[in-house]
Image: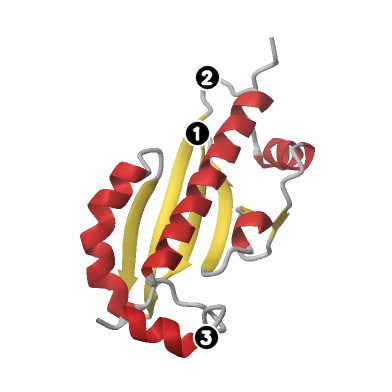
Amino acid sequence: MEPLFVPDSDQVQRWLNEGSTTNYICEHCEGLHLTDLQQLDGVLDSRIFVESDHLVLTTEVELRPTALLPLTIEMGRINIAFPHLKVFVEVSDDALPKLIMMDTLHTRAGVSFSQFRHFLLNVMEYTRQLVSDCQNMGVITYPEGPEGDEGENEGEYLH
């Protein structure tokens, strides 16, 4: 049986490295940033936060303001299709709206590397699927515009 740990940031980073998941720690937050998810078109940030009794993996996608209503209509379907993710829209006065996707791994009783890896791979796959779904719905704001012909995509989603 594998040993169980109540992981701290160093342990989580060792596990990420051991599992070949590219990550880094930035100087602005205490999260472990996941490069594989951050490289997806439309993803602003993806990171793991280590708390005293749980880990939180969160990914943020910037939304087009005109996509709020269509996305709100789809939220029921999204939450049924991705039951392991907590999915919600965050709207503030000083930034574009964001779709937040997150999941939590409780660690108080201890977690093995295999359990952590299972959690990580599942959440990353669900996140990729949901980002792809959002790209297909046309709700994501791209930093440099969507790939392909911008004019063609723009016309499809303005109705």
- At a point 69% along the width and 16% down the height, the residue shown is 3
Q: Does the CB distance between marks 3 and 1 fall below 8 Å?
A: no
- At a point 64% along the width and 22% down the height, the residue shown is 112
**Mark 2: amino acid:** Ala
Question: Where residue 7 sits in the image (x, y, percent)?
Answer: 64, 32
Mark 2 or 3: the one toward you: 3
Tell me the crowding category of disc 2: few under 14, some 14 to 19, or many 20 or more residues within 10 angstroms, Cα based: few
Q: Dot 2 corresponds to which residue?
A: 109
Establish if 1 lies above or below 65.
Answer: above
Quadrant of image for the N terminus: top right
Q: CA distance from mark 2 to mark 3?
A: 51 Å
In-image side of 153 versus 16 (left or right): left
- Corner quadrant of residue 159: bottom left
**Mark 1: amino acid:** Leu
SS type, badge 3: loop
Q: Dot 1 corresponds to which residue?
A: 105
Establish if 7 lies above or below 147.
Answer: above
Q: Is residue 29 visible?
A: no
SS type, badge 2: loop
Considering only order in the chain, which callout, 3 or 2, is on the residue closer to the N terminus?
A: 2
Q: Is residue 114 visible?
A: yes
**Mark 3: amino acid:** Asp
Nearest the viewer among 67 and 120 is 67
Q: CA distance from mark 3 to mark 1?
A: 40 Å
Tell me the crowding category of disc 3: few under 14, some 14 to 19, or many 20 or more residues within 10 angstroms, Cα based: few
Q: Dot 3 corresponds to which residue?
A: 149
Tell me the crowding category of disc 1: few under 14, some 14 to 19, or many 20 or more residues within 10 angstroms, Cα based: some
Q: CA distance from mark 1 to mark 2?
A: 11 Å
Nearest the viewer among 106 and 67 is 67
Image color mode: secondary structure
In-image side of 2 versus 153 (left or right): right
SS type, badge 1: strand
